[in-house]
Amino acid sequence: MTDSAQKMTEDLLRPLLVTSWRFYVVVLVLFGIVLLGVGAFAYQVDRGIGVWGLNWPVFWAFDITNFVFWIGISHAGTLISAILRLVNAGWRRPVTRCAEVITAFALMIGAMFPIVHLGRPWLFFWLMPYPTERQIWPNFRSPLVWDFFAISTYLTGSLLFLYLPTIPDFALVRDRTTGWRRKVYGALALGWRGTTRQWHRLESAMQIMAIAIIPVAVSVHTIVSFDFSMAIVPMWHSTIFGPYFVAGAIFSGIAALIIAMAALRKFLHLEAYLHPVHFENLGKLLLMMSLLWGYFVFAERLTTWYGNESSEMSVFWATQRGSYAPLYWTMVTVNFIVPVFILSFKKLRTVTGCVIASCGVVAGMWLERFLIIVPTLSHKYLSYSWGSYRPRIPEILLLIATFGAMGLLYVLFSKFVPIISIWELKVGEQPEIEDAEVTRDEASTLWRTNP
Amino acid sequence: MAARLPAMYGLFEQPEAAQLAFRSLRQAGVAESDITVISSEPFEHFEFSHRDRSLTLFRLAGIGGVLGFIIGVSLTAGTEVAWPINVGNMPILAWWPNLVIIFEMTMLSAILTTVVSLLVTARLPSRAASLYDPEVSDGKILVGVPLRSDRTPDAIRRALDAAGALVVKTAEFQK
Amino acid sequence: MSHRWGMVVDLDRCTGCEACVVACHAENNIPTVGPAEAARGRAMHWLRVERYWEGEFPDVRLKFRPVLCQQCNAAPCEPVCPTYASHHTEEGLNAQVYNRCIGTRYCANACSYNVRFFNFFNPVWEKPLHLQLNPDVSLREVGVMEKCTFCVQRIKAKTQQVKAENRELKDGELKPACAQSCPATAILFGDLNDPESQVSRLSRSSRGEKLLEELGTLPNITYLKGQAEA
């Protein structure tokens, strides 16, 4: 192996083989936060949803906000990994696994909420289609059943999309370690050797998965948006929701990816692999998504305002000028004004600049989900039944716990699996065939691939 | 219990050297299907990597998708018709919402078929001690040939050495 | 003859006394949630009397409107329930099957009339209030949605009795608790499939209109108000 490849392997395997006390502290703290959330959930299952702030008529608030938010974050991996893979963007290589990991874990966290938010969560399995003695199947016309299918498909696809290209890296770790590590990674590597046949099959499979996972990702967040747009209540029943949500998901996903990459770069000392140019490129993508988000918001709000339909305008003014206005304008600031400003200037599009913009976007996108759900539910058609909402401690603990869970899962993953795809990085380092120094003889032309 | 076969292989530093070894072995009369090249990264542009390409996985994924489509249609239409319940004045066979489920089942089936096909065609998981050397993980490229009775090990050793093998080894493997 | 149950509410007769609300609670075992929970917006009035002020002082007028589940023929709450807990019966009722409900609360969000209610906690009847519970109506547990059923227990009981007696149902013989208790006879209930019944005739009245008709939910309740057209 060349020296640089040797160093690359050592750097990227070091987190797996060397553990500092800081790791244990971080894991303990994050685990504690997650336990708080588990406790809050147990309390809610024991006493009832009444321990939350939900009421009549606001029957969804933090629970569904968290659900849509985390499913949205999960679109990071798909965009980076699948789309950039298909367009052969080389700069994706060090970023691809970080992104896919976010997808997998964000999906797992988001997928918990359809269970957590149930009035009778112990019966969640009734959403699954299976023959029962009651002879009843789920209602396939319900967007919640669509959610179940879409998220199951996307979660399965994403986990496999994450696992398959990790197999060669597991083989690498297997060969470099001894004892229990060798056994565990050997099992995970499935006996991978790296024959040409295996590489071809893996590459074909990754190609197919990349092509398949993109429409699945688009469909997942569209279907999540259908949870709202299928109801004929003011400012939910809008045809814009599908594309609006998908754009918002990719937007929040890229922001989450930038934050995760910056953290990895700092704490795992990966400055040599995650270059400022990666953040620059992602920052440009984030800028584009911010502009796209602004476009969707503008289109939706102009249409509503112009139509002046009374029940819609109640919701409209509640967000623009009424009790939800502080949250609304905060959202506009951190989702649009600040990111567009920071990311438009090359000088500000540094790692730090991108991270600041991204933190704002993550907060702003959570607010956006909240502001789609609660103002509408509290201002439906019959004004006598309008209401309001205030969160209570169990819901806040659950929200914090989801961030703790994401952090914990990510930290654990980067401890046990190389967070940057070693073999893909090596492929990226391969010289172009024209540059390779070869001894030419009469048969050397056989080496060229047929176009 | 599979018989253990001896095999001879050389480890090479550069893909170009592995390519040389590949051609030398071919010139020495070894069939292409008998030559195994193992590396820690794929070398798409080299001739030794040319064979074993196939469209099987793509075709199987397509078939898997069709299967998923059929399952989706059966699941939705079948259960809706089996116990007709009126919800919201919608038709019993509600094709618009069913399309969502049908799409997801199609994609899920295509994805799962792809993964299963990958495992089968790449012969994973593999517990058998097949031709391998852990040095491959250090970046070496392995070019090897099983030694059968009709083969002279010396010719193979010469071919491997001439291409610049760092080391030539003989070992016993299953299959 | 198959039935299609409907209701007519005469807004000019309604005095806002809320006897119907109390009767509904009593008949259908609806819990009272207590002042703290009511302040949090968890009160469960399957039938509520909405009160609107109109005009400026001194020409202030008070309008009352009893709102209950409209038993919509194209109910937005039905297709969204993942477990078929909310579905439409052949007699035109929107049925809520408590046993199937897992409490996603989507139906309540989709309902344009806000007539669906959720059991945020397990309902409690302090002794001796448990003695007043109607044995014909099941108690709901925590996490289950509930709403007006047009007193389906009375519908079932009466139609079975009428069938056993081998006769037809007389108009006005079957009344849900709200219609029975209204002192102003503002609430009328009957079979829309019987063209001679009161509700059939009044639902065709020029004084009649449906609540939120523009949404296309096709409610089974007609509200009467204002002068009849000549």
Image (cartoon, coloured by chain):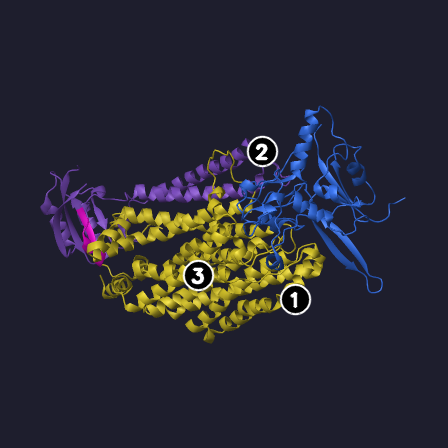
Chain colours: A yellow, B purple, C blue
Q: How many marks?
A: 3
Where is residue C201 shown, x and y percent of the image? 81, 37
User: Are labels 2 and 1 assigned to the same chain?
Assistant: no
Q: Residue at coordinates 50% horizontally, 33% vertically from top-left?
A: A135
- The answer to whether dots 2 and 3 both sit on one chain is no
In terms of secondary structure, where does tag 2 sit?
A: loop
Q: Tag 1, which chain?
A: A
Q: Secondary structure beneath disc 3?
A: helix
Residue C155 visible in this rendered orientation of the protein? yes
Residue A43 in picture, x, y percent from top left: 46, 56
Cα distance in 3D space between marks 2 and 3: 42 Å
Q: Which mark is residue B84?
A: 2
- A278 or C187, which is in the foreground? C187
Which mark's residue is nearer the viewer, 3 or 1?
A: 3
Three-letter code, disc 1: Gly
Instruction: Tell me the mark number nearer the camera, choosing from 2 and 3.
Output: 3
Is residue A344 shown in magenta?
A: no
Q: Chain ID for label 3?
A: A
Q: Quadrant of residue B34?
A: top left
Q: Give me the disc on residue A180.
A: none
Give the residue type that dot 2 points to.
Pro
Instruction: From the top left corner, tell me how far across and down residue C209 is, in percent.
Output: 78, 46
Q: CA distance from mark 3 to mark 1?
A: 30 Å
Question: For residue A107, which quarter of the picture?
Answer: bottom left
| Region rendered in magenta | B132-144
* Mark number, residue A322: 1
Q: Are marks 3 and 1 on the same chain?
A: yes
Q: Which residue is mark 3?
A: A401
In this rendering, position of residue B57 left or right of residue A40: left
Q: Is residue B78 above or below residue A143?
A: above
Give whichever of A78, C45 is nearer the camera.
C45
- In the image, is A315 to the left or to the right of A353? right
